[in-house]
Image (spheres, grey):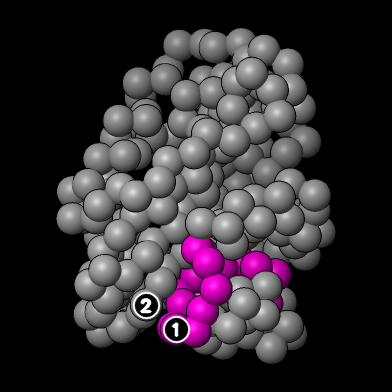
Amino acid sequence: MDQPRYDEVARWYDDAYATSEAGVAGREIVLRLLGDGPGRLLDVGCGGGAHMVEFAERRWTTTGVDVSEEQLALARERGCDVALAPAEHLPFDDESFDAVVSMWTHTDVDDFPTAVSEMARVLKASGTLVYIGVHPCFAGPHSRYRLVEEVPLLYPGYGTSGRFFDEAPGISSTGIRAKVGAMHLPLASFLQAFLDAGLRLDRFEEAGRSDYPWLVALRWIG
């Protein structure tokens, strides 16, 4: 098995993204859509556990999974309960969790529909799944969106699903995507993954500081 892409950038990513202003802003959106516990919560793609700490402070009993051992080492330093596992094969029984959260994962997971199906499987009936990630229309390999504040410049390739590295116009040479690559799903394929998993859409938000949002945030009910 290849070394997980995030192993070599774990601490850099934790500083630059998970605990940065953008990371905190994303987490606040998730917390607002999620609400407070108690209950069992699974964080899929938990990374270094920075968000799990905040979920626990809201009275959730948290468990996290990720494929990067280096990221999980950071999570354990923070006192988080975590396991090494891919999102496509969650090591939990059906309906094990009252809530599931996943942040930024559709640009990393190779098979996002299968990952969403697994999240739905482990979610209790009528439980809550909250997802936040980059907007497939305006932020991705096909879109040069400088500092997510200027008007995005769109290039061919929006309708193509797949993994991209530094050959795409929307991948900065200094950002995370040049280091680990990026998956892209068109908006329809992204939303269909949740619908095919049997989830019911309860809330959809487009977030960002400019006229063109760079985030989507969704609350689904199992």
Q: Which badge, 2 or 1, comes first in the chain's sequence?
A: 1
- Pick whichever, 208 or 13, lies toward us: 208
Which residue position holds label 2? Answer: 98
Instruction: Kindly check if marks 2 and 1 are in contact, taking CB atoms under 8 A apart as contact.
Output: yes
Q: Amino acid at mark 2?
A: Asp
* Residue found 30% across the figure and 30% down from its top: 188
Is residue 44 located in the magenta-colored stretch of the structure? yes
| In this picture, residue 121 sits left or right of residue 206 | left
Tag 2, which secondary structure? strand
Tag 1, which secondary structure? strand
- Relative height, residue 79 to residue 151 (above, below): below
Q: Find residue 89 and name its label.
A: none
Is residue 96 located in the magenta-colored stretch of the structure? no
- Pick whichever, 162 or 42, lies toward us: 42
* Residue found 34% across the figure and 49% down from its top: 202
Q: Is residue 200 visible?
A: yes
In percent of width and height, residue 155 lies at 52, 11
Q: Which residues are magenta?
A: 34-53
- Pick whichever, 77 or 172, lies toward us: 77
- Relative height, residue 33 to residue 166 (above, below): below
Is the N terminus in the top left, top right, bottom left or bottom right quadrant? Answer: bottom left
Mark 2: few, some, or many residues within 10 Å (few <14, many ≥20)? many
Q: Is residue 167 visible?
A: no
- Pick whichever, 178 or 123, lies toward us: 123
In percent of width and height, residue 17 lies at 73, 52
- Relative height, residue 180 to residue 157 (above, below): below
Which residue position holds label 1? Answer: 39
Q: Amino acid at mark 1?
A: Gly
